Image (spheres, grey):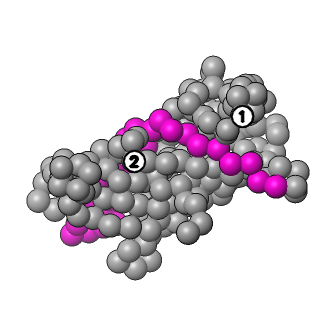
Amino acid sequence: MKLVTTTLGVMMLAAPALAAPALAEERTYVIDPGHTHIVFEVERFGYAATVGVFPDSSGEIVLDMDNPENSRVNATVHTPTVWTGLASRDQAVNGPGFLNTAEHPEIRFSSTAIELINEDSARVTGDFTLLGVTRPVTFDVDLNRIGPDPSMGGREGAGFSMRTSLDRSDFGNSIARTLAIRPPRR
């Protein structure tokens, strides 16, 4: 099953976030669930992709403006909030055959390395925990924008788009489908 992430605060995660400056060279952005969209896509037996959203996430992104490779991401996706557009499918996705949200109510990501590609993109690798199993996962990340956000009273915000793909069987799920996390196509 492929996990698809959309404009996120990365779980899953990176999306527009609120700024909370820490040090002169570091800026901390709190993931704003109202402006973060974690979208996933699951290939359905080769017929079509099923799309879903995790509307509830939290975490922070610390940007080291002088040394971007030292930046950090910690994000949590609250899995029981999954929405696929069909209540019976949501119930199945929450069940033991898929996300088993009763036992594993969160997916977590904590960065361990950042490789800059250019000034607006990077590969962010980290510990990704799904179904209680932690594995390294790499996200392709694009910086969309940093600047005053008019919808947040002009406070500084940062927007990111992140994409990855993973196989749920790597995380102990017997239903081996690939879950892709990526922003929607423009």
In terms of image quadrants, where is residue 86?
Answer: top right
Q: What is the magenta segment's predominant secondary structure?
A: strand
One can see residue 179 in this view:
no
C-alpha separation, residue under disc 1 versus residue under disc 2 = 23 Å
Mark 2, Cα crowd under 10 Å, few <14 / some 14-19 / many 20+, is: some
Q: State whether residue 44 is above or below residue 25.
A: above
Magenta-colored span: 48-75
Q: Is residue 72 left or right of residue 106?
A: left
Q: Position of residue 119 (x, y in %)?
A: 35, 77
- Return the residue at label 2: 35
Q: Is residue 167 left or right of residue 122?
A: right
Give the residue drawn at x 24%, y 57%: 149
Q: Is residue 78 left or right of residue 153?
A: right
- Return the residue at label 1: 86
Q: Amino acid at mark 2?
A: His
Q: Nearer the viewer, residue 150 or 175?
A: 150
